[in-house]
Amino acid sequence: TLACILVVAMVLLNVFTHHGKTLQVPDLKGLTLEQAEHMAKQAGLELVLNDEIYQPQKAPGTVLEQMPAAGELVKEGRKLFVVINANSAKMVNAPDVVGLSAKQARSLIESRGFVVERISYVEDAAYNNVLDLTWRGKSVHKGDKVPEGSAFRLVLGIQDTEEQTMVPNV
């Protein structure tokens, strides 16, 4: 009887787990979310939107990444997790760099995923300190919202090089 129960259990286990039956994951990259959902459903798989990120060089709403990868073998009903391209960049707070040195400002800007596109100088006593931060020609201040990954222009102070300093004769 124990042997009979084991045989029946093994047979039922193979039936319910679809042992040895696998499907190949389709390549969903570059498809719209609707196309990817349709293709996954046809393949007997479930599509789950995992995240949205913004890549300006890719079409909005298209699949950028998928897990498991295309070509992998999975069982029917498996969930496919996808990341799609957002319609626009996420808006985030501009960094507060006015008054910092050029080196500190660049470090802070780049650590937050932004880019220093250009540096310009204006005559000011605050030598090599940030006087202004601009994005698309407009000054931005702490709390202003800008697209994630934006490129900024730093305006730094520089002293007049024509100016001469008198050294006392001692």
Image: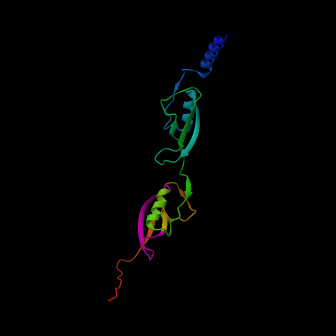
Question: x and y percent of residue 134 in the render?
Answer: 49, 64
- In this rendered view, identify the residue nearer to me: 4 or 135: 4
On screen, residue 168 versus residue 132, left or right, reads: left
Q: Quadrant of the C terminus?
A: bottom left
Question: x and y percent of residue 49 in the render?
Answer: 58, 39
Above or below, 101 against 90 in this view is below
- In this rendered view, identify the residue nearer to me: 35 or 148: 148
**Count of marks placed on residues:** 0
Q: Is residue 114 visible?
A: no
Quick check: is 113 in the magenta stretch?
yes
Q: Is residue 16 visible?
A: yes
Residue visible at 59% across and 37% down?
48
Question: x and y percent of residue 119 in the render?
Answer: 41, 65
Q: Quadrant of residue 162?
A: bottom left
Residue visible at 49% across and 44% down?
59
Residue visible at 56% across and 43% down?
51
Quick check: is 28 in the magenta stretch?
no
Question: x and y percent of residue 68 in the render?
Answer: 52, 34
- In this rendered view, identify the residue nearer to me: 71 or 104: 104
The span shown in magenta is 112-131
Residue visible at 53% across and 55% down?
147
- In this rendered view, identify the residue nearer to me: 148 or 86: 148
Above or below, 168 against 38 in this view is below
